[in-house]
Amino acid sequence: LKDENNFWNEVDKKWPDSPEEWLSSSGICLSNSSASMGKVQSGSLGFLQRQQQIIDVETYVDDLQKKINEFESELLTLRERHESLKEEQETREEESRKLEFALLSGNKELEHQQLEERRMQQTVSQLSKDYEGIFEEMDSSRLKENTAAETIISLEKERAELEDKTNQLQERIQLQQSRNDVIAEELLAHRVSLTETTEQQKNTEEKESRLNKEYEETSLRLEQLKTALNEGEMRLEQSRNRIAEIDGSFEEMLGNRTSMKQELEEDIQLHEQKNEEQTLLSQKLQERQGHLENSVSVSHQESIRLTEFRLQREQLEDQLRKITEHTPEAILSEMDVEASDHKKMGRDLRSLNESLNAMGAVNLAAPEEYAALTERIDYLKLQSEDLQKAVDDLKETIKDINNESRRRFREMFDRVNENFMNVFSTLFEGGEAKLVLTESEDLLNAGVDIVAQPPGKKLQNINLLSGGEKALTAISLIFAIFLVKPSPFCLLDEVDAPLDDINVVRFNNLITGLSYDSQFIIITHNKKTMEIGDLLYGVTMEEPGISKTVSVEFKEAESLIA
């Protein structure tokens, strides 16, 4: 920048501000009627003076061309500096300032050249005036006619030459102007880059400021909500206590129902297992009792046979003793008589021995096992009676819970039905609608039918309504359920999509009325629905594949517009 200032100072020192001053410094003075050189002033020397003026002007133009070349060289140097200082923002800013200075200097030089052009035009105008003066002199003196004619011709030539030089100078000025335009475009590009960086920083600052403001508003809103929550908690404490008692008993009943149901299932499974065990034990007991009875019966029969055998043995021994006492002839006679019985008894004895061997060893612990099995059967019967009693108690509890559920369902159904009638009348601006339970023996298993009658139509099932009427009826039912126990927040996703403009207005009026107690977050493409919001969020894509969230707070926008 110092070099540039020194350059232009040298130019200002070297070149005067106007052609008149430069001609003055060269000893040439222009006036309305004539030109003088030094101290010589004569009408006869006007032609020579004008030739000298032309030479001086050509010299001035050449010097001006040199100055333009020097300026172009200086501009080239500045452009090289501009190309070398593009990488960092501070360097770009410094380069931009340099280019701005160069552009201002160029504009200043351009203005200076334009001023020179105007001054040359003034010179031409002055020469024209001199030309007119010569005509006046021709009218006043015929003696100077020839000289004046020659002067006119020379002046016309001089004028033509000056016009050519002026045109050339204008072309050079236009070329310089185009070069300045290129520099201005480069400077504009740098300014745009700098502006974008500044704009991004400004957007970041605005976003940060907006976020801080939103944070403060959210904090204030949070404090208000906390205060309202504390007040609401104080107001709802008694209601909570009453509800807690009912819910506690109901939850306890539900818990007992669940636990008892699980215990019942476990007891039923245990009971079934025990029944199976009892059945198996009974079968085993019966089998063992059968075996025992068979064993006892067989033992008894064998004992009888053994006793009979012993008696027969004793009889045989008695007979043997008698035989020893009798004679051989008597013995032979008796043996002939009883031989057949003796063979029969031998066969019976062998048969009894085979039966005893087939039975095996006698189980002497069978009576104790029978007693243990009988005791086990009595215990299982007692357990079965306890389980049956528990099942009866559970059935009674389930019956109480179902009765309470029916009562609460009926109460809630009536409240929803009442809200449904009111909301339906509000959205349709008339008409009536109701919820009807289908016929069923059990209230808990009954279905629900929606019967609606828009204004000007007869009462009919919802399936017979149009698409928009169905949507509006469904919205009425949703808000009827919502109004039974409103929540702090409610999210609606394109609920207004199937509605026409008139129904959208009614829907918006309903949302506006409910927004005093709950906050609504609505996803919508409808402009009318957007108008009722306090804060609007939109997603745009300035660049392909990059989404950007934009938010507008209507109160702030209205204040800015106002």
Image (tube, rainbow, N blue to C red):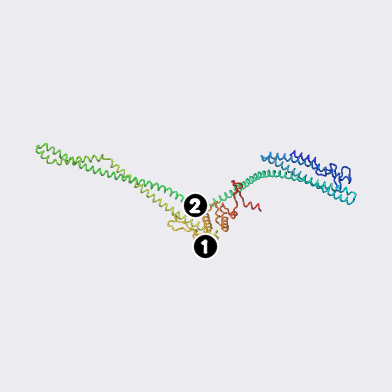
Give the camera-side residue of 503 and 330.
503
- Neighbor class of circle 1 (other Cα within 10 Å; few <14, some 14-19, many 20+) is few
Q: In this view, does 144 lie to the left or right of 460?
A: right
Question: Residue at horizontal 22%, vertical 40%?
Answer: 354
Task: Count the labels in the image.
Answer: 2
The label on residue 243 is 2
What amino acid is found at the position of numbered circle 1 in the picture? Lys
The nearer-to-camera label among 1 and 2 is: 1
Counting from the top left corner in percent of width and height, residue 215 is at 60, 47
Give the camera-side residue of 10 and 90.
10
- Tell me, yes or no, if residue 438 can be seen here: yes
Which quadrant of the structure image shows residue 112?
top right
Tell me whether circle 1 and circle 2 mark residues in contact (CB < 8 Å).
Answer: no
Secondary structure under the numbered disc 1 in the rendered image: loop
- Note whether 4 is above or below 385 in the view shown: above
The label on residue 457 is 1
Give the camera-side residue of 305 and 169.
169
Give the camera-side residue of 338 and 182.
182
What amino acid is found at the position of numbered circle 2 in the picture? Ile
Q: Distance between the residues labelled 1 and 2?
A: 42 Å
- Neighbor class of circle 2 (other Cα within 10 Å; few <14, some 14-19, many 20+) is few
Identify the image quadrant of the N terminus.
top right
Counting from the top left corner in percent of width and height, residue 343 is at 16, 40
- Mark 1 or 2, nearer chain start: 2
Counting from the top left corner in percent of width and height, residue 393 is at 40, 51
- Tell me, yes or no, if residue 119 can be seen here: no
Question: Residue at horizontal 43%, vertical 56%?
Answer: 442
Q: In this view, does 375 lie to the left or right of 187?
A: left
Counting from the top left corner in percent of width and height, residue 346 is at 17, 40
Q: In this view, does 530 lie to the left or right of 317?
A: right
Secondary structure under the numbered disc 2 in the rendered image: helix
